Amino acid sequence: MQIGIIGAGFIGGTLTRRLTALGHQVRVANSRHPDTLAELAAETGATAVWAGDAALGADLVIVSIPQKNTPDLAPGILDARKESAPVIETNNYYPQQRDGKIEAIENGTPESVWVSELLGVPVYKVFNGIYWKHLLNKGAPAGTAGRIALPIAGDDPAGKDIVSRIVDELGFDPVDAGPLAESWRQQPGTPVYGKDFDVEKTLKALAEASPERSVEWRA
């Protein structure tokens, strides 16, 4: 697959490493000049590009940036991807720790719904709750006992199927976490967030989640 990744931090950089190792062609960008990603590109074989070029011809796009930086992405930045190419967003809202107050999220808009509205495209929420070192090193073949499960929230079944195949290829069990409107079930502070649960425990944790943000995760 042709995959565009916007963001080269812990999750974006890890996905660049994992996906290129699996044979995918990756174009990766950060908020700066492509030369700042020369080391990552040399290590992985990915192509470092400007952020505005990351989605060009992509079968899949991954947006993995600090939540507070989402409004800074250029309008139409994802328009050059292939028709119907899914867009994954891995972001988390950390109001006290990094992002400051985002009014819409504080008022109850799920984080990924807010991102989707800003980007102007449907998105799929996944990879937001796994520790990056575990994403890098703890993938396992399908059928492995205790294989880590990753919830995927999103609305279009066809796109969710593509995302699920990528999750499985990376070594994790994909779990349908419902529509994007219920993506709050995997936000920071929920029972599934940051856990290496298997499918059964992931489904249980998603069902036990509350839409009310805890004090730690409010501005």
Image (cartoon, rainbow, N blue to C red):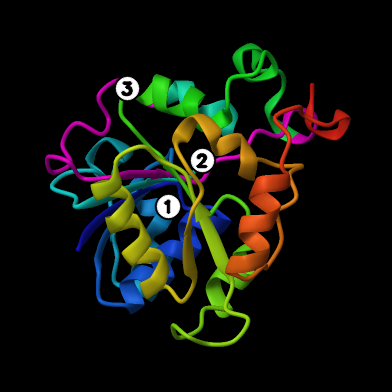
Report the front residue among 93 and 196. 196
Q: How many labels does the image show?
A: 3
Dot 2 and dot 1 residues touching (CB under 8 Å): no
Mark toward the start of the polypeptide (2 vs 1): 1
* Residue 30 lies in the magenta stretch: no
Q: Give the range drawn in magenta.
A: 73-97
Dot 3 and dot 2 residues touching (CB under 8 Å): no
Mark toward the start of the polypeptide (3 vs 2): 2
Report the front residue among 46 and 184. 184
167 lies left or right of 60: right
Residue appearing at x 87%, y 29% in the figure? 215
| Residue 42 visible, this angle | no
Depth-wise, is mark 2 or mark 1 nearer the camera?
2
The type of residue carrying mark 1 is: Thr
Q: Which residue does the numbered mark 1 point to in the structure image?
A: 36
Q: Residue 84 carries which label?
A: none
Mark toward the start of the polypeptide (3 vs 1): 1
Label 2 SS:
loop
Q: Position of residue 176 (x, y in %)?
A: 46, 53
| Disc 2/disc 1 C-alpha distance (Å) | 16 Å
Q: Is the magenta stretch mostly helix, strand or loop?
A: loop
The picture quadrant where one finds residue 52 is top left
Depth-wise, is mark 3 or mark 1 nearer the camera?
3
| Quadrant of the image containing the N terminus | bottom left
Label 1 SS:
helix
Q: Position of residue 209 (x, y in %)?
A: 71, 41
Q: Which residue does the numbered mark 2 point to in the structure image?
A: 65
The type of residue carrying mark 2 is: Ile
Q: Which residue does the numbered mark 3 point to in the structure image?
A: 120
The type of residue carrying mark 3 is: Gly
